[in-house]
Image: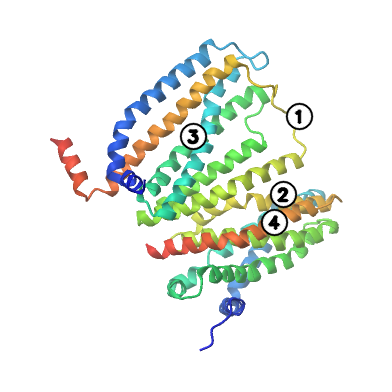
């Protein structure tokens, strides 16, 4: 029997995650519709004035994107936990680090990336000046990766609980603070015609930091959740 | 050294040792707090700018300092619990969270009360206040997570992981909030006189800070002792202790 190299193994795990998720298409669309609907609520609540909306748009888009990732992350380990796959994953000789990393990356590819691609449309509807679009795409693309990793830690901690939903947001939202700050600042700076590269670089640094370290926390949390 | 470590970290030994330590710590805490607060409130001269309202620092500063140090201590206990699987350490995590949350809340409330006469408003989105608020949320998350688990040992370890993740994030959060605050032009409100504090005001402050640390220790020991009795209620030594007390 041929043993797989680490890269090949990781790619196969990623493909497995993507295949499983793509079989359930409606679940993939839900966070996107959530994003769209909540963004629609803001003009209804704040009034349709284009100046006000344009000023608030970077913050609104970032907060709603953050909530969408949070909503989607609830199901990150749920299916595998319910049908016993998660136990098999922990028992298998494949390093837990790799599995968890690939699971989270798949989650980002299927929520964070589509949200990022949808965001220019919503930016247009919220009258955000087009100078901010590049920064919006970059910051959301990079920032949603960080959000996915942080949310995965929370999801792993709460996966074994019957009612984990609200608890998950309590655990995860305070940790989202830096991402929100850098993300919305990048867009606001770009809109104001200033250089947005420093917050974007900080977001990228955060993404690498969590990419390297978060899988340990996620793996540890999954072990605790399955032990009980 | 390891033998000592294991002995000391066994719940039974800890229960006995902490029983002997507790009265001393309680006396230190009570004396420091009473003397410090009385000194600070009655004998220290009023501030030339803020008048008497500055006196709230004798509660506010110690509460904030201990709340922050408490989180770090809780995270270290969490790391110990995860690495060496010491039950006592996750009891410490569980018990430190409500005390820390209460102190953080106290720091926020006293800060708001002080802010009204000084800044003219109850709440300002200042970098430091915002960081303390986030710290309060982190404490609340740990309490909520612990309560959600049925199995208390799993709950302890889950909280240990969350405390560690929080501790890694605290510097990032603190720093990002500082950055955010300097990005948005601060309001015209600022600290009156950033000059260093006068020794006559500092001495009682040191006393109340010591008192708060000792109080944190007292509260933590009492909570942990309770938790030990609860979790070890089926062991012989706890039964003997309880029957001896009942007689």
Residue bearing the label numbered 1: B188
Under circle 2, the secondary element is helix
Question: Visible in this render: residue A219?
Answer: yes
CA gap between label 3 and label 1 equals 29 Å
Q: CA distance from mark 3 to mark 2?
A: 37 Å
Pointers 3 and 4 in contact (CB under 8 A)?
Answer: no
Q: Which residue is mark 3?
A: B103
Q: Position of residue A10 (x, y in %)?
A: 59, 76
**Do dots 2 and 1 share one subunit?**
no
Number of callouts: 4
Q: Are marks 3 and 4 on the same chain?
A: no
Q: Is residue A139 above or below residue A181?
A: below
Name the residue beneath numbered marker 4. A205
Residue located 53% across and 63% down the image: A74
Residue that carries the numbered disc 2 in the rendered image: A46
**Mark 1, residues whose alpha carbon is within 10 Å: few (<14), some, or many (≥20)?**
few
């Amino acid at each position: 029997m041929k043993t797989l190299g680490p890269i090949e193994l990781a790619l196969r795990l990623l493909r497995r995650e993507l295949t499983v998720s793509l079989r359930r298409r409606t679940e993939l669309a839900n966070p996107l519709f959530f994003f769209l609907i909540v963004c629609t609520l803001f003009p209804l609540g704040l009034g349709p004035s284009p100046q006000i909306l344009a000023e608030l748009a970077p913050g609104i888009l970032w907060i709603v994107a953050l909530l969408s990732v949070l909503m989607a992350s609830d199901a990150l380990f749920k299916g595998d936990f319910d049908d016993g796959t998660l136990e098999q994953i922990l028992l298998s000789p494949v390093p837990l680090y790799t599995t968890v990393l690939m699971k989270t990356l798949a989650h980002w590819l299927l929520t964070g990336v589509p949200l990022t691609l949808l965001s220019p449309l919503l930016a247009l509807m919220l009258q955000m000046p087009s100078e901010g679009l590049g920064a919006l795409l970059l910051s959301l693309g990079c920032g949603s990766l960080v959000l996915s990793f942080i949310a995965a830690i929370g999801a792993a901690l709460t996966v074994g609980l019957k009612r984990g939903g609200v608890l998950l947001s309590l655990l995860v939202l305070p940790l989202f603070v830096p991402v929100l700050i850098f993300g919305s600042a990048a867009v606001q700076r770009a809109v104001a015609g200033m250089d947005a590269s420093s917050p974007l670089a900080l977001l990228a640094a955060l993404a690498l930091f969590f990419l390297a370290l978060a899988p340990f926390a996620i793996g540890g949390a999954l072990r605790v959740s399955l032990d009980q | 050294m390891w033998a000592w470590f294991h002995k000391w970290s066994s719940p039974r030994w800890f229960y006995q040792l902490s029983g002997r330590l507790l009265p001393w710590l309680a006396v230190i805490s009570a004396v420091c707090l009473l003397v410090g607060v009385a000194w600070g409130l009655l004998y220290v001269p009023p501030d030339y700018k803020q008048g008497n309202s500055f006196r709230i620092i004798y509660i506010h500063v110690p509460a904030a300092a201990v709340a922050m140090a408490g989180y770090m201590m809780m995270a270290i206990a969490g790391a110990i619990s995860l690495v060496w699987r010491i039950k006592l350490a996750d009891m410490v995590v569980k018990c430190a969270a409500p005390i820390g949350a209460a102190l953080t809340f106290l720091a926020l409330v006293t800060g708001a009360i002080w802010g009204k006469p000084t800044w003219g408003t109850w709440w300002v989105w200042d970098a430091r206040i915002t960081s303390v608020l986030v710290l309060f949320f982190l404490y609340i998350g740990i309490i909520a997570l612990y309560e959600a688990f049925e199995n208390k040992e799993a709950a302890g370890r889950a909280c240990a992981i969350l405390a560690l993740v929080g501790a890694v994030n605290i510097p990032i959060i603190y720093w990002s909030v500082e950055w955010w605050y300097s990005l948005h032009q601060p309001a015209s409100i600022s600290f009156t006189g950033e000059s260093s504090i006068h020794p006559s005001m500092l001495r009682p402050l040191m006393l109340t800070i010591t008192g708060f640390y000792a109080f944190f220790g007292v509260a933590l020991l009492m909570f942990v002792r309770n938790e030990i009795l609860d979790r070890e209620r089926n062991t012989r030594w706890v039964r003997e202790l309880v029957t001896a007390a009942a007689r």
